[in-house]
Amino acid sequence: MEHSETFDVVVVGGGPAGATAAHELARQGHSVLLLDRAGRIKPCGGAIPPRLIKDFAIPDHLLVARARSARMVAPSQHAVDIPIDNGFVGMVDRADFDEWLRERAAASGAVRRIGSFDRLERDADGVSVVHYLARPKHHRGEGTPARVRARAIIGADGAKSQVARQAIAGAKDTEYVFAYHEIVRAPAVKPEGYDGTRCDVYYQGRLSPDFYGWVFPHGDTLSIGTGSADKGFSLRGAVGQLRQISGLGEAEVLRREGAPLPMKPLKKWDNGQDVVLAGDAAGVVAPASGEGIYYGMVGGQLAAQSVHEMLQTGDARCLKRARKRFMQKHGTVFAVLGIMQWFWYRSEKRRERFVKICEDRDVQQLTFESYMNKELVRKKPMAHVRIFFKDVAHLLGLAKV
């Protein structure tokens, strides 16, 4: 058996999920290797709710903007402005945010290495071996083959995770939305109607046949993007249209990014031995909204918890708890959002009605309270009843658009 370093845990992927998992395990005293491909940033609006800021102790300096309202735009250009009462949604630049999370993991004791995951094997004693291509910082070649042993592995290497595809049955069957955005510099002379504290969301078929387009403020920059599961739809063309619509057609483009986003959680997150998934690799991007940072970090935390329990007890069945605990907390929200996306994003008429519903103050308050706190709001039962009957009226076409 070739000599190799042995870690308690190897975390593959240094995004919010992987960095959070590495931080949690390192601060509990486990030896952790955080393996990350440098320079990879996924397309993301960068919105983080107050619950995330509080639960994960995110410092103020990482917030490049504070969104205090949202604008929903229908196919007819009818817009509904929704204030965020008594609070804000934090906006982050993923390049800086993700790196800060990785640095925090390292400060807790995790070993950081830059490299690309290659494959999993097992040594003669049954311990997993992670093969990867090591790359020194700023190195652009193929990398040097390297290997480490791991008592446990967390696959947080994004949608189409290679860890998942090699270790988890059924992982290849996931469906995806493909997202694309452009980070542009905020112009010195702002276009008419520009508001650096407002997130604009466009529900228009020309910008996405099954998702939405967004313009999110990042202080000195903006994220302008869209997504679709239709492989024939031109995401780049749609973003170009969205830039023109929002008066930002001439804004300087700083970078362009695209990536697949999973449409629903995988049915299985572990291999029953020593591998568990987190973040996009586990499929925890919320349907309809596309929100992934909060759910990715919660998934990373739960993966770390399950691995810690496995290492403490030697019982690999502990790994199943990551998915079970996540779905107990958030499964209902994912199911409701999935139904919403399937129904409301299917036609221009339905998108128009969806935006119309968003004019309702009951809808606005309950939606934002649930989003901000990451819990279904149950303290206003009559508001839920009113929303139900209003929803039915819109579904049946009885309400005026």
Image (cartoon, grey):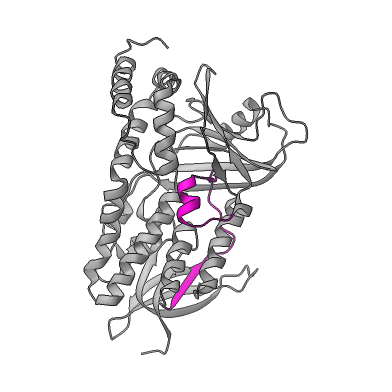
Q: Name the residue located 46 percent from the left edge and 35 percent from the top edge.
A: 232
Residue 140 position by quadrant: bottom right
- In the depicted structure, whether residue 401 falls above or below residue 105: above
Q: Where is residue 169 in the image (x, y as percent from the top left)?
A: 26, 59
Q: Examine the rendering and report whether any part of residue 282 can be seen.
A: yes
Check the image and report above or below for 236 versus 136: above
The one of 11 and 180 positioned closer to us in this rendering: 11
| Residue drawn at x 26%, y 52% as measured from the top left | 267
Measuring 39% from the left and 31% from the top, which residue is drawn there? 366
Q: State the image quarter where residue 287 is shown.
A: top left
Task: Give the camera-side residue of 138 and 184.
Answer: 184
Based on the picture, tell me whether residue 49 belongs to the magenta stretch. Answer: yes
Residue 290 appears in the picture as rendered: no
In this figure, what is the number of numbered marks? 0
Q: Which residue is drawn at 65% across and 68% down?
A: 138
In this view, the residue farthest toward the right is 188
Q: Where is residue 314 in the image (x, y as percent from the top left)?
A: 24, 77
Q: Give the range drawn in magenta.
A: 31-59
Q: State yes or no: residue 46 in magenta.
A: yes
Give residue 142's position: percent from left, percent from top: 56, 70
Place of residue 296 in the rendered image (x, y in percent of width and height, measured from the top left): 42, 53
The answer to which of 297 and 234 lies nearer the viewer is 297
The quadrant of the image that shows the N terminus is: bottom left
The C terminus: image quadrant:
top left
